[in-house]
Image (spheres, grey):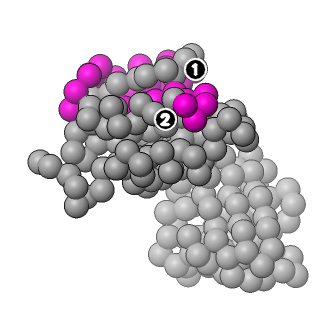
């Protein structure tokens, strides 16, 4: 979210990002605070004050300050971030990461081929994105299609995923880190195009 941050003698406007295992700030200066380096944290008067191994930083987050503190203390699991609930109707196509599949199975989804709440597509190259139009037909009206792909590769990029999604009539709504090596982009049917 957009906010003002202060770190040492630096202060300015920018965007604070609450990632899976770190706080990032990008603006007039850049800052990265891994959760494991945080020693103390306090939310008061709309400010999140974070003491960590590199010093002390303050983020003016308004009413979100306490929510951020709670999320840092109790980070959501990967399945929480991907929206998988017990009983979710899920289809997995081409994802072969054992840890991902184990965590997914532990959440207790229902395997489905149609009217899916979530379809996961593993894509190593942009050529795999040709399947988006077909997979779109398998998701429920408010369902999601997560494309899971390698980070930092030229064979497939975030922009390529977004453009292929748009070509298939989908919009990108979220990006999440899936692992140290993979990221995910969430695609959905635009609200105006959903049939109940």
Report the residue marked by disc 2.
129
Left or right relative to 52: residue 179: left
Foreground residue among 147 and 125: 125
- Asked if residue 159 lies in the magenta stretch, the reply is no
Q: Is residue 40 above or below residue 110?
A: below
Residue 43: x and y in percent read: 59, 70
Disc 2 crowd rating (10 Å Cα; few below 14, some 14-19, many 20+) is: many
Which residue sits at x=74%, y=46%? 36
Location of the N terminus by quadrant is: bottom right
Helix or strand or loop: what does disc 2 sit on?
A: helix
Q: Looking at the image, can residue 79 be seen?
A: no
Q: How many marks?
A: 2
Residue underneath mark 1: 97
- N-terminal-most mark, 1 or 2: 1
User: Which residues are drawn in magenta?
Assistant: 99-127
Local SS, label 1? loop
Q: Position of residue 92 (x, y in %)?
A: 41, 23
Tell whether 52 sits left or right of 131: right
State the image coordinates of residue 22 (x, y, percent, origin top left). Answer: 69, 52
**At which x and y percent is residue 83?**
39, 41
- What residue do we see at 21% from left, 32% from top? 115
Q: Residue at x 85, y 56 (%)?
A: 53
Task: Report, in whole angstroms, how far the alpha carbon at label 1 lies from the one at label 2.
Answer: 19 Å
């Amino acid at each position: 979210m957009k906010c003002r941050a202060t770190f040492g003698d630096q202060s300015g406007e920018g965007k604070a990002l609450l990632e899976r295992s770190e706080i990032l700030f990008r603006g007039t200066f850049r800052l990265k605070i891994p959760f494991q380096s945080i020693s103390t944290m306090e939310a008061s008067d709309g400010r999140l004050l974070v003491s960590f191994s590199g010093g002390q930083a303050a983020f003016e987050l308004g009413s979100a300050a306490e929510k951020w503190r709670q999320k840092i203390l109790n980070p959501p699991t990967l399945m929480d971030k991907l929206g998988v609930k017990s009983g979710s109707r899920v289809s997995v196509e081409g994802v072969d990461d054992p840890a991902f599949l184990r965590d997914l199975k532990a959440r207790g989804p229902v395997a489905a081929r149609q009217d899916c709440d979530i379809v996961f597509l593993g894509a190593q190259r942009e050529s795999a994105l040709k399947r988006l139009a077909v997979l779109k037909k398998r998701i429920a009206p408010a369902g999601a299609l997560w494309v899971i792909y390698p980070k930092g590769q030229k064979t497939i990029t975030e922009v390529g995923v977004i453009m292929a999604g748009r070509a298939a009539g989908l919009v990108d709504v979220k990006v999440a880190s899936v692992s140290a090596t993979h990221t995910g982009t969430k695609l959905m049917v635009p609200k105006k195009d959903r049939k109940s």
